[in-house]
Image (cartoon, helix red, strand yellow):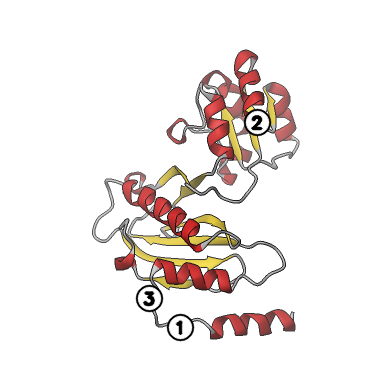
Amino acid sequence: MAQQTKKRKQQESKVDVEKLYTPTEAIKLARELATSKFDESIEVAMNLGVDPRHADQQVRGMVSLPKGTGKTMKVAVFAKGDKATAAEEAGADRVGAEDLMEDMQAGNLDYDRIIATPDMMGIVGRLGKVLGPKGLMPNPKLGTVTMDVAKAVEDAKGGQVQYRVEKAGIVHAGIGKASFTEADLKENFDALVSAVVKARPTGAKGKYVKKIAISSSMGPGLKVDVAETSAV
């Protein structure tokens, strides 16, 4: 633990806590500070001027990162017949109906995305208490309740990420790995910020994007100059 504390101090000594970095500067430094033995994620936190307790101030959606996520997405699909076959051919990790529901009820929830055809929602609805808290409940607004399960699976596997505002008005999302190039991370950053800005709810008043920070999984946060962010 002492060694970890020393490492953290070394990381923080390279960060100017008073400075507002440009997105490119923050991405570059976040990559430099990602010194763990594993390939750390590069993450973005956006502090928004919303109160998620109000229905008209919810911020939630999907965005396809142009350079992918660097993460292998594990996808489960609730479907039958031809749609089940299409999901399997698209690369779904697990496809089923009642059997899949029972498996999830038993605690097997190691999935990053769950997709369902509309006719399966009666079965999926029984999993609300376990899927809801994990943000895994299929939702037509997010494109995870759809007849085109093949496209939904391909999108999930191809770099699509979900974002959702938390209680404190903050959206967290990964934009790739430290092994990505700075240019690729910047492109993904711009795509994420643009999507969140476009998702501004009708109930949001005043300044919408208040703060942005970029960090690696194990590194300190770097404050970004919102004015230097092209998508805002």
Above or below: residue 7 compared with residue 147 = below
Q: Residue 91 carries which label?
A: 2
Task: Measure the C-alpha gap from mark 2 to mark 1.
Answer: 45 Å
Q: How far apart are marks 1 and 3 (CA)?
A: 8 Å
Point out the image quarter for the N terminus. bottom right
Left or right: residue 159 versus residue 75 is left
Q: Which mark is residue 4?
A: none
Q: Is residue 84 left or right of residue 99?
A: left
Instruction: Look at the numbered discs 1 and 3 and tell me whether their residues touch, using CB distance below 8 Å.
Output: no
Q: Quadrant of residue 177?
A: bottom right
Q: Name the residue under label 3.
A: 20
Label 2 Cα crowd, 10 Å radius (few <14 / some 14-19 / many 20+): some
The residue nearer to you, when weighing 125 against 191, is 191
Residue 149 position within the rendered picture, expressed as x and y whole percent measured from the top left: 55, 25
Structural distance between the alpha carbons of marks 3 and 2: 42 Å
In the rendered view, tell whether residue 5 sits above or below residue 188. Answer: below
**Badge 3 density bin: few <14, some 14–19, many ≥20, Cα 10 Å:** some
Crowdedness near tag 1: few (<14), some (14–19) or many (≥20) residues, C-alpha within 10 Å? few
Tell me which label, 2 or 1, sits earlier in the chain. Answer: 1
Q: How many marks?
A: 3
Check disc 1 and give the amino acid type: Asp
Mark 1, secondary structure of its residue = loop
Of residues 146 and 216, the one drawn nearer to the viewer in this rendering: 216
In the rendered structure, are the residues bearing label 3 and label 2 in contact, judged by CB atoms less than 8 Å apart?
no
Q: What residue type is labelled 2?
A: Gly
> Which residue does the numbered mark 1 point to in the structure image?
16
Q: Which of 87 and 199 is in front in this view?
A: 87
Q: Position of residue 136 (x, y in %)?
A: 58, 40
Percent of width and height locating residue 64: 47, 43
